[in-house]
Image (cartoon, grey):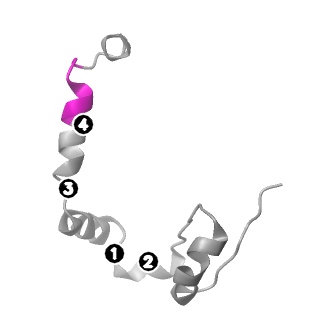
């Protein structure tokens, strides 16, 4: 019913998933280079959500690491 109220075809979800599965790492790399480019990497911020105990070790070599704890 949601698909119909939004004007989407009944096969929207399966078509969406098929489209995502056709995206390759090279496609992502090319699009990144087109819109971001090499010159803007210094201004980039990566946000990782998860358990710091699990992900912290793998992230330390990427640059400064700031852990924000929930209140």
Label 1 secondary element: loop
Distance from the alpha carbon under mark 4 to that under mark 3: 11 Å
Distance from the alpha carbon under mark 3 to that under mark 1: 19 Å
User: Mark on residue 37?
Assistant: 1
Identify residue for label 2: 40
At x 52% / y 85%, what residue is drawn?
A: 62
Image x and y of residue 2, in percent: 38, 15
State the quadrant of the C terminus: bottom right
> Pointer 4 and pointer 2: residues touching (CB < 8 Å)?
no
In the displayed structure, would residue 33 be above or below residue 22?
A: below
Lower position in the chain sequence, tag 4 or tag 3? 4
Label 3 secondary element: loop
Image quadrant in which you'd find residue 34: bottom left
User: Mark on residue 10?
Assistant: none
Of the two numbered discs 4 and 2 in the rendering, the one whose residue sits closer to the viewer: 4
Image quadrant in which you'd find residue 59: bottom right
Distance from the alpha carbon under mark 1 to that under mark 2: 6 Å
Lower position in the chain sequence, tag 3 or tag 1? 3
Distance from the alpha carbon under mark 4 to that under mark 1: 27 Å
Image x and y of residue 18, in percent: 18, 41
Q: Residues within 10 Å of mark 1 (few under 14, many from 20)?
A: few
Residue range corresponding to the magenta coloring: 9-15
Label 2 secondary element: helix
> Pointer 4 and pointer 3: residues touching (CB < 8 Å)?
no
Identify residue for label 4: 16
At x 65% / y 80%, what residue is drawn?
A: 65
At x 39% / y 82%, what residue is drawn?
A: 39
Identify residue for label 3: 23
């Amino acid at each position: 019913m949601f698909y119909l109220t939004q004007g989407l075809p009944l096969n929207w979800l399966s078509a969406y998933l098929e489209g995502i599965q056709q995206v390759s790492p090279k496609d992502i790399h090319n699009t990144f280079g087109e819109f971001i480019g090499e010159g803007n990497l210094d201004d980039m911020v990566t946000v990782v959500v998860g358990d710091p105990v699990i992900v912290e070790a793998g992230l330390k070599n990427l640059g400064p690491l700031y852990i924000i704890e929930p209140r």
